[in-house]
């Protein structure tokens, strides 16, 4: 008798957990919206990079504003910077 009651309680618990997760999933899918869209990306080797040389404006729903994003020629967010050091420039590194 005790085993039967324990089995019924366990079955009801699993059923309610499953139904709760199902209701949560449907609720999230119903209210789902795109909060922040990332710029287009590509896979290079084993790295995920943004597509090169983009200058785009996107609307950010979370901040309720338009975001300006610049992607450089290397596929990273930011401006293009000259890599070659001019002859009259000194580079100092601290550790």
Image (cartoon, rainbow, N blue to C red):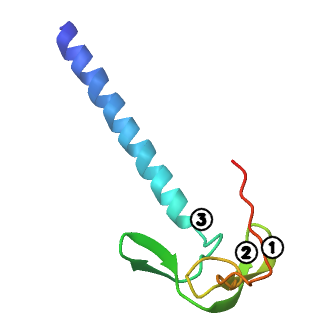
When the figure is inspected, residue 29 is found, relative to residue 52, above or below; the finding is above
Residue 31, placed above or below residue 19: below
Q: Relative to 9, is 78 on the left or the right?
A: right
At horizontal 47% and vertical 51% (from top left) the residue drawn is 23
The residue at the far front in this view is: 87
Mark 2 or 3 closer to N-term?
A: 3
The front one of 23 and 69 is 69
Q: Residue 4 is drawn in which quadrant?
A: top left
Q: As drawn, is 83 to the left or to the right of 1? A: right
Q: x and y percent of residue 69 in the render?
A: 71, 82
Q: Secondary structure at mark 1?
A: loop
Q: Residue at x 65, y 71 (%)?
A: 36
Evaluate if marks 3 and 1 touch, with contact meaning CB atoms under 8 Å apart.
no
Q: Which mark is residue 35?
A: none
> In which quarter of the view is residue 52 placed?
bottom right
* Front position in the image: 47 or 31: 47
Which residue in the structure is indicated by mark 2? 60
Quadrant hosting residue 35: bottom right
| Residue matched to label 1 | 64
According to the picture, the residue beneath numbered tag 3 turns out to be 31
Estimate the spatial distance between the alpha carbons at disc 2 and disc 3, rounded to whole Å.
17 Å
Measuring 63% from the left and 91% from the top, which residue is drawn there? 54
At 36% across and 42% down in the image, what residue appears? 18
């Amino acid at each position: 008798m005790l085993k039967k009651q324990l089995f019924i309680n366990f079955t009801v618990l699993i059923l309610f957990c499953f139904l709760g997760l199902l209701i949560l999933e449907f609720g999230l899918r119903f209210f789902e919206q795109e909060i922040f869209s990332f710029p287009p990306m590509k896979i290079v080797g084993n790295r995920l990079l943004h597509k090169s040389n983009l200058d785009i404006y996107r609307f950010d729903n979370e901040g309720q504003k338009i975001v300006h994003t610049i992607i450089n020629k290397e596929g990273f967010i930011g401006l293009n910077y000259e890599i070659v050091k001019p002859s009259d420039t000194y580079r100092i590194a601290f550790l």
